[in-house]
Image (tube, rainbow, N blue to C red):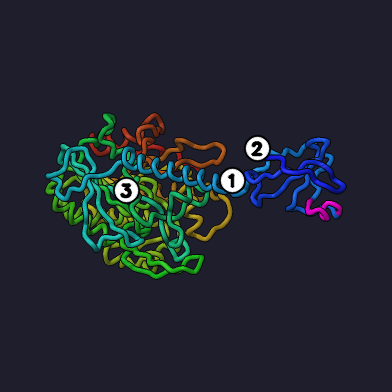
Amino acid sequence: MPKETAAVPGPFPGRLLFVPDLLEDRSQIWIPKKGLSGCLCRFKACSNEAREYGYTLCNQYSWSIFLFGVIRMKRLSKFIKFAVITVLSFLILSLIAVYAFVIKRPAAVQEMADAKPYKWNKISLGPEAVSSDGSEYHLLSKKGTSRNWIIFFSGGGASWDESSAAHPIKILNFLTGREAGNYFADIPFYLLNLLDGLTATDNPENPFKDWNVAYIPYSTGDFHVGKRTAEYTKDDGSTFTMHYNGQSNVQDSLNWIYAQADKPEKLLIAGESAGGFGSAFWAGKIAEHYKDAEIYQYSDSSFLYSGKWPEIIGKEWQADFAQVFGFAPEADLIGSAYKGNGSRLPDNAVLLQSYSLYDEVLISFQNRINDQEGPLNAELIADWSRQMRGSVKSLADTLPNYYYYLTDYGLNKKTGMTGHTFATRDVFYKAEEDGIRLLDWLNDAINKNNRYSVGSRFLDES
C-alpha cells in the first residue's frame, strides 16, 4: 500500500502519496482532499498551473482513476518474460514427450534376417544417400511372414525450378497458416505415424499384412529420378544447395532390397502421388532383376499434365531419363510411363492405377507447375479431371493388362474437390465406388487373380 508522506501546498491542497512499489520512476502521486476524484503525477504534462509545483493534473473530475490499479511496468515486463519462458518450456517438454512416447521410430537393423516381424526398421545406405538438404537419407523396411514383397515409393510434392525449390514443406507452415510448401527437404521424423493402408500390418483387414515391405522415402523433390546438385538463391537473397539425388537414393535402396529379397513369388511395385511416378519409372528395371516373380505395378493418385516435363526432367533434374528408363517423358508423364512399361515389363505383368476424381492436391500442383495463378475454380477442376480421365481411357484402350479404379469418394460439395491418395491412408479401407471398396479391388487383382476396372461410367462423362 502507498504511504501518505506530506501535505501539498499551492492551489491543489491535498495528500502526497509516495508509491515506489507501483510506479517505475518512483513517482509521487497527489490525491485531492475531496477523495479519488483525480490525481497529480510528475511524468505527464497537461496543466501549466500544476507544472509549477512539479506535478501534472490528470482526470481531475473523473472517478475512473484508481490509484492502486497502476502497474509497475518493470514488474509487468518481468512477469511477461517469466510467462513466455514457462509456456515455451512446457511446449518443449510436451514435444519431447510426444517424440519419446507418441512418434513411432524404426529400429536400426541392416539385415532383414535380424529384424522382428511386423516392426519398422531403418536401413542406413551410406554417405552418398542424401536428402535434398544434404541430410542423411535411409530406407525403411518391415519383415513379413510370406515370400511376397511390396516395394513402395513414397510421395511428397515436387521441386521443378529454383523458386519452388526455395519453399520446402515445413511443420511451421502448417502451424502458422502459411502455404505448406512444395516438397520434403528431408525425411520427416514423424513419417511412420503417417503410414496406414496397405502398409498397416496390424490391421486384420489388410490383405497384404503378411507381405515384406521396403518403403523408399522421398525427400528430393524429383520423382525419385534426379541426379543433379544445384546452387540456388532464396527470396531473401540467401543461398542454398539443392540435391536432386533421387536416382542415387533409389539405386542404393534397390541394391539392399536385391540382397534381402531373394526370390519373391509376388512383387508389388507401388507408390502414391510423386511416388506413383517413381514406381512407374523404376518398375522396368526392378522387373529385370526379378524375372521369375509375378509383377504388379500400382500407381495411386499420380497425374500431372504439363508440357514442361521434358525440360524439367532433362535440365532441372538432369535425369538422363530415356537412357536410364528406356522411354521419353511426355506432357502426360504418367501415361508415357505406363505405355513404356507396356513394352518393358513382362507380358504377364499387371498395371494398376487409382484416382480420386477431383484430386485437390494434384489440381493445385498442376496449376503451379504450369504457372497458372489465382484460386482454383470449377473450370480448372473440370479441366484436370477431364485430362486425367482421358489418360486413363487411352491406357485402357491400348494396354491389355491395365486396370483402373476411379471414384469421387469423399467429394466436398463446397469446394467441388476430392481428397488425395488412398494407398497408405486409412481411407484405403473406406473408399468405395459402385459397391466395391478400393481395398477389395486391389486384393482381387493381386491375390485372387480376379481383375477388373471400377468407375468406368466416369470415362463417358465430358
Q: Residue at x 57, y 48 (%)?
A: 77
Q: Residue furthest front?
A: 6
Mark 1 closeness class: few <14, some 14–19, many ≥20 residues within 10 Å? few
Q: Is residue 146 left or right of residue 96?
A: left
Q: Amino acid at mark 3?
A: Gly
The span shown in magenta is 49-55
Across and down, in percent, residue 66 comes to 73, 38
Q: Residue at x 85, y 48 (%)?
A: 10
Give the camera-side residue of 80 and 336: 80
Across and down, in percent, residue 198 comes to 29, 38
Mark 3 closeness class: few <14, some 14–19, many ≥20 residues within 10 Å? many
Q: Quadrant of residue 142?
A: top left
Marks 3,1: beta carbons within 8 A: no
Q: Amino acid at mark 1?
A: Leu
Q: Which residue is mark 2?
A: 1
Which quadrant does the N terminus fall into? top right
Q: Is residue 376 left or right of residue 31?
A: left
Q: Quadrant of residue 324?
A: bottom left
Give the camera-side residue of 257 and 4: 4
The circle on residue 271 is 3
Give the mark nearest the N terminus, 3 or 2. Answer: 2
Q: Which marked residue is nearer to the observer: mark 3 or mark 1?
A: 1
Disc 1, SS: helix
The circle on residue 378 is none
Q: Amino acid at mark 2?
A: Met
Give the camera-side residue of 278 and 27: 27
Q: Which marked residue is nearer to the observer: mark 3 or mark 2?
A: 2
Q: Which residue is mark 1?
A: 76
Q: Residue at x 48, y 44 (%)?
A: 358
